[in-house]
Amino acid sequence: MSNLSNRINALAESATIAMATKAREFKSRGIDVISLSLGEPDFKTPKHVQEAAKEAIDEGLYFSYPPVPGYPELRKGIAEKLQKENGITCTDKNILVSGGAKHSISNVFLTILNPGDEVIIYAPYWVSYVDMVKLAEGVPVIIEGSIEQDFKASAAQLEAAITEKTKAIIYSSPCNPSGAVFSKEALQEIAEVVLKHENIMLIADEIYEYINFSGEHVSIASFPGMFERTVTVNGFSKGFAMTGWRVGYICAPEWLVKGGNKMQGQTTSGICSIAQRAAITAVTGDMEPTKEMAAAYKRRRKLVLDLLNEIPGIKTNEPEGAFYVFPDMSEFFGKSDGETKVNNSGELALYLLSKAHVSTVSGAAFGSPNCIRISYAASDDNLKKALAQIKQALAELK
């Protein structure tokens, strides 16, 4: 007997987590799998951040329930960072700290959506956006940027997708999975569309902010008239290699933060106290480790693109940020190695796992079914080995 709710039965499993699970199954059978599926830095959390957590434990002052929206010192530090680095005029009252950026985004949708409200989602999109909207009883509306557009849908596409039911718009920049970065000019065009429609909120997912190779990160909330219309989402997982610490946040108008605080207070309450103390040091401390990680990702981007471009049939563009490449693999659809026929990107990802022993993720999970996502948050040696094995496996498809 199954008593699961309709809500859960309608919810898709995260494709990135599902592929990571399959990779672990292969490893448990003694197969050496190179994992390029999860969006997780392969670096350790910077030492000074680790030490801050140890000091917080030793002080013995942070074992009680923390405030629901986050420690005042952390919210103040985040607000000061956003003012200084992003040009966003805000205070600690505009900050809500949650259990990672995923939690932050989910909170926003649950806080602002009513049944039937539409959310325009830029595709390629992060795998959880669509199901988060559905969980909040909203309706996802997808606008897609092609590889020829560097995976960036136009402002004209956005305008055409807006209806009287549109409640929110969400994009990520730098983008997971494509690595696309919206320029200041492109964001200005988006802002102009949003400002014409009074009741629409824009959700800007900026979790990859520090892994940006375009030379400039721009926050749309800094544009005239946009602060009251924007939820800026960020966190510590990517830029500070703090995935397991689970610290994310939003910067938003005070009315929305109060609503999110109410939602969080009835579900998770405040997040881990020690992780918050570490995050205070991360946001106010030495940024050199973050810069070093970004430089390594940029070097790896070139390595991976060079190796991918040696493989006949793969179509690539140059990502401007994050740590992914998102190649078009449609040339291989309909082909077989004599045993396995590959019909789509999902089957291709499974083929590469079983044949090349490399885990990737189907682009269909991100709204771009011709592509696969390859993470280069891995060592140079593993990347070289993985691409060689992928090249060999693809060569067997005829």
Image: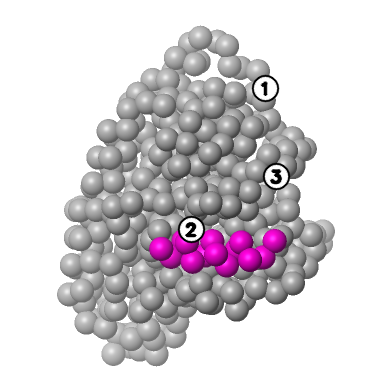
Where does label 3 land, which residue?
Answer: 256
For image coordinates 51% across by 9% down, the residue present is 59
**In this orientation, which residue lies closer to the viewer: 343 or 196?**
196
Seen in the picture, residue 273 relative to 128 is either above or below; the reply is above
Q: Are marks 1 and 2 in contact (CB under 8 Å)?
A: no
Q: Residue furthest top?
A: 59
Q: Secondary structure at mark 2?
A: strand
Seen in the picture, residue 97 relative to 277 is either above or below; the reply is below
Instruction: Tell me the number on the disc at residue 65.
Output: 1
Q: In 3D space, how far apart are the residues under numbered discs 3 and 2 (Cα atoms)? A: 20 Å
Quadrant housing residue 90: top right
Instruction: Tell me the number on the disc at residue 10.
Output: none
Indicate the amino acid at tag 2. Ser
Where does label 2 land, which residue?
Answer: 172
Q: Earlier in the sequence, mark 3 or mark 2?
A: 2
Quadrant housing residue 166: bottom right
In x, y percent, where is residue 327? Answer: 33, 73
Q: In 3D space, how far apart are the residues under numbered discs 1 and 3 (Cα atoms)? A: 23 Å
Q: Earlier in the sequence, mark 1 or mark 2?
A: 1
Q: In 3D space, how far apart are the residues under numbered discs 1 and 2 (Cα atoms)? A: 32 Å
Q: Nearer the viewer, mark 1 or mark 3?
A: 3
State which quarter of the image contains the C terminus. bottom left
For image coordinates 52% across by 77% down, the residue present is 156
For image coordinates 59% across by 23% down, the residue present is 72
In x, y percent, where is residue 328? Answer: 35, 77
- In reply to whether residue 196 is colored magenta, the answer given is yes
Indicate the amino acid at tag 3. Leu
* Residue bounds of the magenta highlight: 185-198
